[in-house]
Image: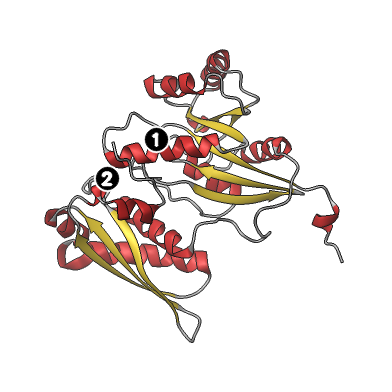
């Protein structure tokens, strides 16, 4: 017997969210999907790879692609991230440019607008963090942006509070092409659980050590064992580049790493709906950003130039 979804004409498509670092793309993706699929941090360039969150509106399935923030890259890892972001945008059925309404059109946003000129696929404008800006200023910013790019539609949202998010969802669902769903109805992300676990710990690492820890640190999930009682034992390694950084992560008498582990364990248990036994290790891996294997681990292409 056919299900109600199979009897209706289904639609499915990809929407890439692009913007400069800290525009609020990850928070918005989580709000659109209704689940935590992308990590959020005050630290810029937190998202390193394409993170896909899957959501359903009636007979339409939308795969939201959270891309790394686009900026002028200087290091190899940064070049890989920006290349990944543009690749995600180029493969999508529609692009949503997310702009921090507080910052407006700064040089980084202007560079993005220039790069989007002549873009063949539909482009939507999402002004985020509008709860922090006066309405007259918002209207003026929206008008200026639409004079520069012919956006299909302009949305004003606060991803952190959820205001305006449903309207974005409805319009994007209408813009998706007819086609079969690509993922099961109950799936909210295509990221393997091991990768999700690594990302959650990386988020907690940044939250705890935003000012002290350099951007170039990473987390890998080494072991994932399901126990007889249904709980999960997870072992992870946090890699830093110098011994001084390792000591910062550990903290006095190991208090910092314990706090990071406790926060990560709590989020993980919520995400996979079972008890989690999390064990964290901190190791020094010098120049890991020049190691092609680490890029493959993160789902990035290794820049050779």
Side (left or right) of 34 relative to 72: right
The residue furthest front is 304
Question: Where's the C terminus, which quadrant?
Answer: top left
Numbered tag placed on residue 99 in the rendering: none
- Look at mark 2 in the image and give the residue it sits on: 215
Query: Label 1 crowding class (10 Å Cα cut-off): few <14, some 14-19, many 20+?
Result: many
| Residue shown at 37% from the left, 62% from the top | 263
Instruction: Answer with left or right where residue 295 lies relative to residue 138.
Output: left
Q: Quadrant of the N terminus?
A: bottom right
Disc 2 and disc 1 in contact, CB within 8 angstroms: no
Residue at the (31%, 54%) spot, across then down: 294
Residue 251: where, in percent of width, then height?
18, 61
- Mark 1 secondary-structure assignment: loop
**Where in the figure is residue 88, as x and y percent of width and height?**
51, 39
Image quadrant where residue 194 sits: bottom left
In front of the other: 99 or 19: 19
Q: Relative to 133, is 41 above or below?
A: below
> Residue 203: image x %, image y %?
37, 53
Tell me if I can see residue 91 in this picture.
Answer: yes
Relative placement, left or right, of 131 versus 197 is: right
Mark-to-mark CA distance, 2 and 1: 13 Å
Dot 2: element: loop
Q: Residues within 10 Å of mark 2 (few under 14, many from 20)?
A: some
Q: Which residue position is annotated with label 1?
A: 21
């Amino acid at each position: 017997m056919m299900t109600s979804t199979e009897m209706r004409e289904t639609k499915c498509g990809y929407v890439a969210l692009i913007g400069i670092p800290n525009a609020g793309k990850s928070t918005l993706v989580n709000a659109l999907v209704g689940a935590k699929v992308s990590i959020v941090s005050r630290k810029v360039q937190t998202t390193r790879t394409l993170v896909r969150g899957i959501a359903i509106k009636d007979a339409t399935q939308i795969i939201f692609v959270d891309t790394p923030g686009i900026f002028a890259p200087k290091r190899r890892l940064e070049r890989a991230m920006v290349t990944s972001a543009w690749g995600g945008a180029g493969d999508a059925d529609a692009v949503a440019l997310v702009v921090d309404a507080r910052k407006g059109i700064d040089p980084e946003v202007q560079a993005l607008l220039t790069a989007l000129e002549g873009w063949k696929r539909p482009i939507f404008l999402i002004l985020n963090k509008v709860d922090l800006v006066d309405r007259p200023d918002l209207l003026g910013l929206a008008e200026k942006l639409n004079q520069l790019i012919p956006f299909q539609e302009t949305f004003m949202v606060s991803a952190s509070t959820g205001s305006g998010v449903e309207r974005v969802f409805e319009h994007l669902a209408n813009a998706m092409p007819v086609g079969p769903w690509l993922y099961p109805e109950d799936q909210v992300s295509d990221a393997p659980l091991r990768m999700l676990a690594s990302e959650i710990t990386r988020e907690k690492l940044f939250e705890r050590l935003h000012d002290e820890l350099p951007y170039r640190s990473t987390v890998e999930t080494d072991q994932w064992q399901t126990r007889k009682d249904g709980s999960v034992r997870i072992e992870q390694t946090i890699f830093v580049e110098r011994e001084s950084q390792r000591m910062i992560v550990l903290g006095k008498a190991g208090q910092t790493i314990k706090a990071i582990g406790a926060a990560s364990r709590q989020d993980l248990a919520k995400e996979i709906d079972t008890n989690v036994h999390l064990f964290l290790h901190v190791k020094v891996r010098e120049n890991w950003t020049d190691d092609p294997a680490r890029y493959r681990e993160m789902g990035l292409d290794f820049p050779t130039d």
